[in-house]
Image (spheres, coloured by chain):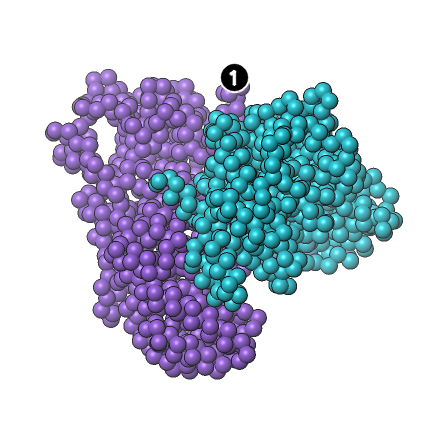
Chain colours: A purple, B cyan
Amino acid sequence: MRTSIATVCLSGGLDEKLAAAAAAGFDGVEVFENDLVASPSSPTEIRRRVQDLGLLMELYQPFRDFEAVPPDHLARNLRRARRKLELTCLLGAPMLLVCSSVSELATDDDSLASEQLHQLATLAEEYGVRVAYEALSWGRHVNDYEHAWRIVEAADHPALGVCLDSFHILSRGTGLDGIGSIPSDKLFFLQLADAPVLAMDVLQWSRHHRCFPGQGGFDLPGFLHRVVAAGYRGPLSLEVFNDVFRQADPGPTAVDAMRSLLGLQEALGHRLDTRPGADLDLTRPPDAVDPAGFAFVELAVDASSGPETEDLLGRLGLAHGGQHRSKPVQLWQRDDARLVLNYGDQRLSANLEGDSLVTALGIESADPAQSVRRAGALIAPRLPRRRGPAEADLASVAAPNGTSVFFCRTRTTPSWLDDFLPLATADRPGGDGPTHIDHVGLIQPFEQFQASGLFYRLILGLRPRGSVEYAAPNGLMRSRALASAGGRVRLALNVPVLGGDVSGPATAQHVAFGCRDIFATAAALRERALPILPIPRNYYDDLDARWELDPAMLEAMRRFGILYDRDETGGELFHLYTGMLGHRLFLEVVQRAGGYDGYGESNAPVRAAAQLAADNLLTEG
Amino acid sequence: MRTSIATVCLSGGLDEKLAAAAAAGFDGVEVFENDLVASPSSPTEIRRRVQDLGLLMELYQPFRDFEAVPPDHLARNLRRARRKLELTCLLGAPMLLVCSSVSELATDDDSLASEQLHQLATLAEEYGVRVAYEALSWGRHVNDYEHAWRIVEAADHPALGVCLDSFHILSRGTGLDGIGSIPSDKLFFLQLADAPVLAMDVLQWSRHHRCFPGQGGFDLPGFLHRVVAAGYRGPLSLEVFNDVFRQADPGPTAVDAMRSLLGLQEALGHRLDTRPGADLDLTRPPDAVDPAGFAFVELAVDASSGPETEDLLGRLGLAHGGQHRSKPVQLWQRDDARLVLNYGDQRLSANLEGDSLVTALGIESADPAQSVRRAGALIAPRLPRRRGPAEADLASVAAPNGTSVFFCRTRTTPSWLDDFLPLATADRPGGDGPTHIDHVGLIQPFEQFQASGLFYRLILGLRPRGSVEYAAPNGLMRSRALASAGGRVRLALNVPVLGGDVSGPATAQHVAFGCRDIFATAAALRERALPILPIPRNYYDDLDARWELDPAMLEAMRRFGILYDRDETGGELFHLYTGMLGHRLFLEVVQRAGGYDGYGESNAPVRAAAQLAADNLLTEG
């Protein structure tokens, strides 16, 4: 289906918005009035610009507060309409969007509304323009699409139809059955927006919190299915008012937007596979390959952070088992827990000196080639291969914040592991230790949080596991969890809830290792003198008050700095943290029991406070 | 009255919070459970720390989900209660706050609630602790204070009383008459928070958007008046959950918080002056002196931005009329419009090279000494005097973002103007020009926006004129206007709505000059070749569509780049902008007509877009 985006979705001047939309691969645009009014280009210059970029001019919007006014106000409104229709015509837009009135002048009189919209449509015809009437969810008298359709039906003018907007309909929970009874030739336009489910005034919700399909809580595929089943074949046009997108770079936002429409078409395709009936031109990427685990996590290190990281990994129980044949890259592993330390990554810039940083995720895929094709179809930027002679051909793509995502099969011949020369000294430390990577916690830039979530969800085929907020000592954090169907790949994407000046341990990445027995592992870590993050005694007193845990176990937890969480079905998580590696990374060891499926989010404030206290101690000492 | 603050209001670790509260002059604190659980200090260490800081330990909170459970759950709850009462006792807190249950276990049975709270109070007595029961506005069965009081009254235990929380009461619009019927010895505690008036879920509203008294939309003085009239004489304790404060430096936040309680006591005092009856120990600053205008605005300039600024001021119609006798400081003026250019200000640091910056506001006060005393009483930091021999004694204080605020009388002998030696070359340019400073637009740091608003409001006695949000091309901005009673001093405090990476013209300061006739002034500016910000033709087409202005006037506005706004009562604003002076300052000329009292906020998006376009043009050129 044709794709389109309203200029209000993107930041910058109108020219930048149009260029970003074209670069991201959109077929067309809606021009938003405020963008036009503020533009130094004339309507005809804008028309030419849109053409030159290879875009279709789908619509001009919005024209407000027109219908159902007392007759003595009509002349003024028609004068306004004439001006805006002229503009629409000069822009080369075939359609003007008219939204239901919020004016105090508007009367609750459907036949008057129909009659005046009929006049507007007649005027529009003179300019070769069609009028799409949309019910705002906060319209004064008309606030649902069925009401708007009754008025349009009664107006009975060929140049007048309805515009459906997913936000206005889904935010109010309006029933969707009525969509099927609107004739397809009266479904003039379709605007799409998702939104988180919030209990707030619908106007504020709409103006600030809309997001792209797949980023919120609405069932956009189900909604779209209704609309295409009713015969709509016009563009899928995004109209998203979002405070964060308004201040984000328009280029990446447009890519995120386009990806959301590709994901939406895929989801619609899945529905149509089981309930066919519509002959649609859907863009569909190759199916996702369910990730079978983390093949590796790559850390960039430098001359200062590298040895510190090596030391910590050794105490954790991993062994330096291999050295890359041509690059300053080490392989550390224990069972399926593999970390790659890269001493040559340029992304560790001057201001990150002394830090270790997660720069790449290696994802186990049964079919890496298909994984890469899917990523490409979902416009993930392909990264240049870094392959030497006789080295494995590992393809990778870039996540929105620049993290590389590799697709690989570890247990195959040849394997990427073959690029690492086995070391004679690679003795695995005795005692218990990690067996695999349980999850990775990634801090995302404030402006790219939504885009990152959608990227990992779609590219890796992960499922969202909910979102939590917690108070770190220096700011509120949001954590959004994603997991593969089998739970073998888990990500926690973290971001300060507000932008601004948040730093410190709360905004560090982490790699969490799974183990079989956390008490045995903790004993081995202590044996190997691993610095475990000290947890306050007050925390254990509180655990005791809340859970009445076995005193001996509680005492062992306290001794080792093990934290605890329990879910509603009795699943349990035991976990502990290392100290910080520089300022941007720490490690975690977890043991899941009884089907626990979370990440110990309830302990995040205690962990962050303990890290800050340890950090202050180091700074003072 | 005694002042207190809950540790949850401040960011950082518990030790930092306590230190900040003490430094800001609070008498006491409430310790919030999460802060204690995450603290590495034991309860007795915290108790000692609080004592050493000279603070009173007023309360430990909250204990949740206790009352009205089925009998078989009571033992568990009493076990939890015993642990928390032990803790309260170790902390040295005389009181534990119990908030109404949100648990699904809680039954809607007031007598059961009373009976169980009686048991809790009996237990509390063993520890020498009193229990304050508070109705959460989202409590499962108990969500207003009158209901909580009925339960407490029926429980009839000397160690059990109520805690009133202004947010829970005012957010639900609960009537206040019931406060008077609670015996004063049962009013155990009072928590104060203001909040903006929002239409949203009360839990989210409470957890994220509370602010200090005077920063929101609630009538806190009226509420407090009821509570003290009922005989409450305990502490005024702030309990504010605010996303921004959570990430702001705790020191300034604590000062802001303390100032809010001083302002609240002053407002209460004003009420009691006219309706006496309570014998209260209120802290009251000297009365505000209504500012009579801007004496001057000071700009810091450097070798690059200075000459550019001088050039612009000359074209604007100001004359370089005086030179400071001992400092590299120029006086530019025309009638009452005075700008002071300071070539020696250290605040123009290396990364602001080439910029001009508003660093000081000179406020006309009929009694500068009293203005300064008031500022001091409201804990505004006094700035060191910069007085040479035979120079005027100008006292100043620092606003939260570091801007200096001077209090002066210009038309007096001696005057601060005497420090400037009159220049022979000071010819005032011909033609029309500014006559005074109409308002100053100041960008505030994201974390200090609330504090700045309260600072200017209280220190200068300004009145808030509402707050608007507008979409600049690179982000959403919030603008809060404040004005003196006579409208002679007006400030617009601006901030990006979200933190994060917002820069460019939208985040620049501005100085707006008033004039008698903007068309004559614009003609003179053009005559003097002042670069006026070009406004798109599309804007005037839209004005025409909206307002049907006189075509000749519209054409003149278009020619000169004059923008237009009209308020609901027909008042009109005409205004134009200069180009940018560096990256952080621009100037404006305004003419108000018919009592227009705003700032042309509706034109801000067009202005910001035009500035960005002009900026891009310069960058490309």
Q: Nearer the viewer, residue A548 or A586?
A: A586
Q: Please indicate whether residue B417 sits to the left or right of residue A537 in the image.
A: right
Q: Residues within 10 Å of mark 1 (few under 14, many from 20)?
A: few
Looking at the rendering, which quadrant does residue A188 occupy?
A: bottom left
**Figure check: A378 above or below B341:** below
For label 1, the residue is: A621
Quadrant in the picture for the C terminus of chain B: top left
Q: Image point 48% across, 26% down: which residue?
A: B350
Q: Which three-letter amino acid code belongs to the residue tagged 1? A: Gly
Looking at the rendering, which quadrant does residue B318 occupy?
A: top right
**Figure check: B330 above or below B430:** above
**Figure check: A276 above or below B121:** below
- Asked whether residue B499 is in view, the answer is no
Q: Nearer the viewer, residue B164 or A475?
A: A475
Q: Please indicate whether residue A85 sits to the left or right of residue B399 in the image.
A: left
Q: Image point 38% across, 79% down: which residue?
A: A122
Picture coordinates of residue A576, whole percent (x, y): 44, 31
* Chain under numbered label 1: A
Q: Nearer the viewer, residue B1 or A150?
A: A150
